[in-house]
Image (spheres, rainbow, N blue to C red):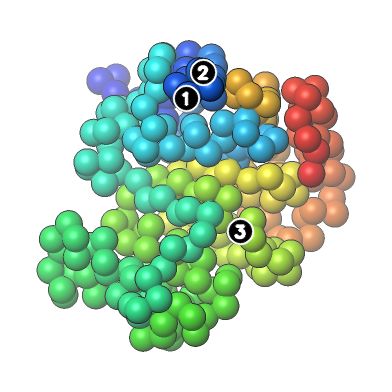
């Protein structure tokens, strides 16, 4: 989306964003003074200690939580308008697949709910299954797939609407390191093919550094952004780039940012 001057408008624009939850034990300030711009094609990772507001901010973008102060736009719209326009896909921490539906059926379900024809449901599902290398598993049930494959199916479901924005809430956190490395490589390849904008929550410094064009470091509650790091790494990144001096230096900066914000290192 471009503004009136023909300049590409930000995909996400947050200004002085605040969010306070009101509980029986009193108010809890989850986010304070959050200012952030995410541009088209960025891969942005959010990292910080548990409870720092990473997931809360992602949920604000998705209109799953409403801010109590400041402003935020998604593709130039309010989060509510963006949600109604199906402007994003959302991948949760757990795959959340229905065990009684096939993988094809799980991917088609949201398309079915909003009224796509059966032919278009199938065409979209087949296309996104191919994108995540699950083309031969459409008729399998979730319990017949490994955890990593289930999460790839969850990503496919989020891609089915073909939105330009993909929001991912620590999707690989429960997987072992070998599977996680493989999915990180596949996610980068998917990002390169689709040119989508990605917001990605993680607790892993190596994962954030490997995947991102921009790393957002957050402090403990009340959540605020303490550093925004533009990655100098090339967009094409083999896994062994993690042994390079540039990668190690970037990981060190992230770790120092977490420490300076009194966060936990990982």
Q: Residue at x 49, y 80 (%)?
A: 143
Alpha-carbon neighbours of circle 3 within 10 Å: few (<14), some, or many (≥20)?
many
Q: Residue at x 41, y 14 (%)?
A: 69
Residues under labels 1 and 2: Cα distance? 5 Å
Image: 166 above or below 51: below
Residue 83: image location, x then y, percent: 28, 40
- Disc 2: which residue: 26
Q: Earlier in the sequence, mark 2 or mark 3?
A: 2
Foreground of the two, 141 or 244: 141
Q: Is residue 62 rendered to the left or right of residue 35?
A: left
Image: 194 above or below 108: above
On-image quarter of the N terminus: top left
Residue 140: image location, x then y, percent: 41, 85
Q: Which mark is residue 83?
A: none
- Disc 1: which residue: 23
Q: Which mark is residue 172?
A: 3
- The local secondary structure at tag 3 comes to loop
Residues under labels 3 and 1: Cα distance? 31 Å
Q: Are marks 1 and 2 in contact (CB under 8 Å)?
A: yes
Q: Residue furthest front?
A: 24
């Amino acid at each position: 989306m471009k503004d009136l001057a023909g300049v590409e408008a930000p995909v996400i624009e947050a200004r002085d964003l605040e969010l306070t939850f009101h509980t029986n034990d009193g108010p809890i300030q989850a986010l304070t003074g959050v200012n952030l711009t995410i541009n088209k094609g960025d891969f942005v990772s959010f990292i910080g200690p548990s409870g720092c507001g990473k997931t809360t901010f992602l949920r604000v973008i998705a209109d799953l939580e409403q801010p109590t102060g400041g402003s935020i736009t998604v593709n130039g719209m309010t989060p509510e308008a963006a949600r109604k326009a199906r402007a994003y896909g959302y991948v949760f921490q757990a795959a959340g697949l229905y065990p009684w539906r096939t993988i094809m059926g799980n991917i088609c379900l949201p398309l079915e709910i909003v009224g796509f024809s059966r032919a278009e449901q199938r065409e979209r599902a087949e296309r996104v299954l191919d994108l995540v290398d699950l083309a031969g598993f459409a008729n399998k049930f979730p319990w017949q797939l490994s955890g990593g494959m289930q999460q790839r199916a969850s990503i496919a479901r989020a891609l089915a609407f073909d939105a330009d924005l993909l929001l991912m809430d620590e999707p690989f956190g429960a997987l072992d390191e070998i599977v996680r490395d493989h999915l990180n490589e596949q996610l980068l390849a998917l990002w390169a093919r689709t040119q989508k904008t990605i917001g990605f929550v993680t607790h892993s410094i190596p994962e954030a550094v490997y995947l991102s064009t921009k790393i957002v470091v957050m402090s403990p509650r009340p959540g605020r952004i303490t550093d925004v790091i533009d990655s100098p790494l090339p967009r094409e990144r083999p896994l062994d780039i993690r042994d390079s001096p540039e990668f190690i230096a970037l990981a060190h900066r992230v770790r120092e940012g977490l420490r300076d914000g009194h966060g936990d290192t990982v």
